Image (cartoon, helix red, strand yellow):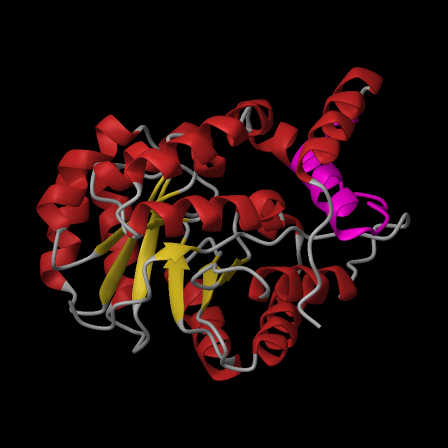
Amino acid sequence: MQNALPCGIYPMLYAFFEENGKLRTDPFLQQVDATLATSAAGVAILGLATEVSKLTVQERADTVRSVAERIDGRKPLLVTVYGNTPQQQISFAERAIDYGASALILQPPAEPLSDAQLRAFFSTVMESISCPAGIQNAPEFLGFGLSNESLLSLAQEHDNFAIAKLECTAVALEPVATRLSGKVQVFNGRCALELTDNLRAGANGIIPGFETVDKTSDIFAAYGSTQPETADQLYKALLPVLCFLMQGIPHLLTYGKMLAALRLGIKQGGSREPALAATTFGSNCVKRFFDQLGTFESST
């Protein structure tokens, strides 16, 4: 497999804002530090959990640069590329590569496209960039996506198609992982739901939310050390947290970010609309999960 990334956990970092909506830089760096203190394989940014569609192009570019500088080559950096035209994605991809992205994950545009149109969209971007690239296929969250056949065709047509980032059940992932084995690395997301079953199904890793990176990394490490029973037990203990968080993207952005802030020891701050308002009950649930998980250990 060409340009293979280390298998494992690549947490998607959250975007934190001031009360006036200004993007904050320090929380990105604190999330990087917390990730580097774990056995995570790398770091991911600018996905749905980073609220990429709410960020300006310059904010996205500045985030890539600051995060890459903080990582300083110690682990790979996966950068999601957002844009509504192939040229927008190509332009941002070139900047991300210049700033230190190890690999890119192309996200579908905002307006729905047919399977054939989306395949052509991604094909145009992939043939124009030199970096290992992947596709986020998340019809459950985005409302449309590629068929499995189109994913497989793109893998055959483009040597730099290196990652398939799926958002699906482990059962749905298995046939894709089987057919792409040895050609393209397959990752799931979904906050790491079904983590161990995804690994059994052939996933090379998971791109979950940042808030549980220490726990999900321990589960992956246990599974990779031929201790699937231990991994299952660790996953069982974490499952109530994951089930609570993975109730849709707006829910995750409110409560996953709240849990991340508590574990980092920082203020959650404000938000950019649209945003789901936290309830007292939801906040109490997060506090209970924080009591279970505790704070992140510092990497310094």
* Quarter where residue 78 is shown: bottom left
Q: Position of residue 48 (x, y in %)?
A: 54, 45
* Quarter where residue 283 is shown: top right
Residue toward you, 41 or 92: 41
Decide: is 100 above or below 33. below
Q: Outermost residue, right direction?
A: 19
Region rendered in magenta: 253-278
Q: Is residue 72 magenta?
A: no
> Which residue shows up at 25% across the image and 68% down it?
4
Which image quarter is the N terminus in? bottom left
> Which residue shows up at 45% across the image and 37% down it?
192
Is 49 placed left or right of 293 in the picture?
A: left
Which image quarter is the C terminus in? bottom right
Is 148 placed left or right of 298 in the picture?
A: left
Q: Is residue 266 magenta?
A: yes
* Quarter where residue 223 is shown: top left
Q: Outermost residue, top direction?
A: 281
> Which residue shows up at 77% across the image and 65% down it?
26
